[in-house]
Image: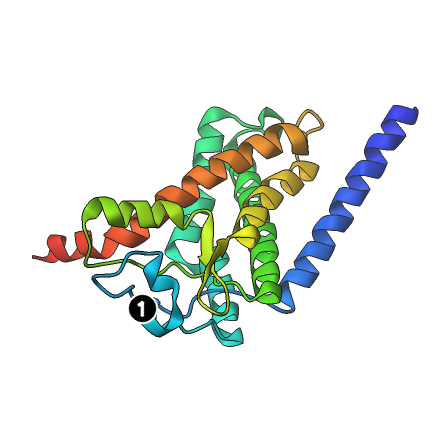
């Protein structure tokens, strides 16, 4: 009885935490859509380009954060593809099996990924706004392919502060792990934040790195396709 009561208490606390995160995250930060940020000038390395005078870095505005929050986590093509694609993979793998199959199971999984995105984006945008960190991806452009790939992978863990200096992307990493770990509170009991949640965060970092590579080289591939 005590064990069951403890589990119910933990789940209630988990839901309360999620509610607080969503409320706080939507107040100060909200987003990252601001359009494509300027590329780092050709002839400079990523480290050199962090100096505002050299790179012409312009901090994000509150409006840019709001639009980016919506675009990156809810309305963008990548976000929508993530909701429905990940739900389809979960449906094929029957994970979690307790959610069943058919239309009901599929939409349950879609809602799960939407909830994760809401938590992840709120944590990232809220912390980034409070700390003055940039949530955009700045393409390197005009450099050797390996240099650009390194820049994209580096952005998984490093961003820019309000002065344009390179800093560890605490908001981004916290959002990735927080979204997956807190989402475990609406999963079956066998799913735990420090088990499947932590593992999901590790995968999330990998997906973030892959997404940065797409952002870096996608426009070039699009131009080649049109040619």
User: Residue at the location (63% across, 39% down)?
Assistant: 181
Residue sitting farthest toward the left: 227
Element on which disc 1 rests: loop
Q: How many marks?
A: 1
Image quarter for residue 180?
Answer: top right
Q: Nearer the viewer, residue 3 or 110?
A: 3
Q: Nearer the viewer, residue 23 or 77?
A: 23
Q: Can residue 87 be spotted in the picture?
A: no
The percent position of residue 126, horizontal first and vertical second, equals: 61, 61
The percent position of residue 36, horizontal first and vertical second, equals: 33, 66
User: Residue at the location (39% across, 52% down)?
Assistant: 78
Would residue 10 be found to the left or right of residue 114 on screen?
right
**Please, is residue 165 above or below residue 177 in the view?**
below
The percent position of residue 179, horizontal first and vertical second, equals: 59, 45
Residue sitting farthest toward the right: 1
Q: Residues within 10 Å of mark 1 (few under 14, many from 20)?
A: some
> Label 1, on which residue?
38
């Amino acid at each position: 009885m005590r064990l069951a009561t403890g589990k119910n208490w933990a789940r209630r606390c988990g839901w309360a935490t999620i509610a607080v995160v969503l409320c706080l995250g939507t107040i100060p930060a909200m987003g990252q859509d601001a359009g494509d940020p300027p590329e780092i000038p050709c002839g400079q390395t990523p480290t050199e380009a962090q100096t505002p005078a050299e790179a012409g870095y312009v901090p994000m505005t509150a409006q840019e954060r709001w639009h980016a929050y919506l675009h990156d986590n809810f309305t963008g093509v990548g976000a929508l593809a993530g909701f429905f694609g990940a739900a389809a993979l979960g449906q094929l793998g029957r994970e979690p099996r307790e959610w069943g199959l058919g239309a009901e199971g599929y939409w349950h999984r879609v809602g799960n990924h939407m909830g994760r995105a809401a938590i992840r984006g709120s944590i990232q945008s809220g912390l980034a706004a409070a700390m003055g960190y940039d949530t955009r991806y700045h393409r390197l452009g005009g450099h050797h392919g390996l240099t650009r790939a390194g820049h994209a992978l580096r952005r998984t863990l490093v961003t820019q502060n309000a002065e344009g200096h390179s800093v560890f992307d605490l908001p981004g990493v916290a959002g990735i792990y927080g979204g997956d770990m807190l989402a475990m509170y609406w999963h079956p009991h066998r799913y735990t934040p420090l088990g499947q949640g932590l593992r999901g965060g590790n995968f999330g970092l990998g997906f973030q790195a892959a997404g940065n590579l797409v952002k870096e080289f996608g426009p070039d591939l699009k131009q080649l396709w049109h040619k």
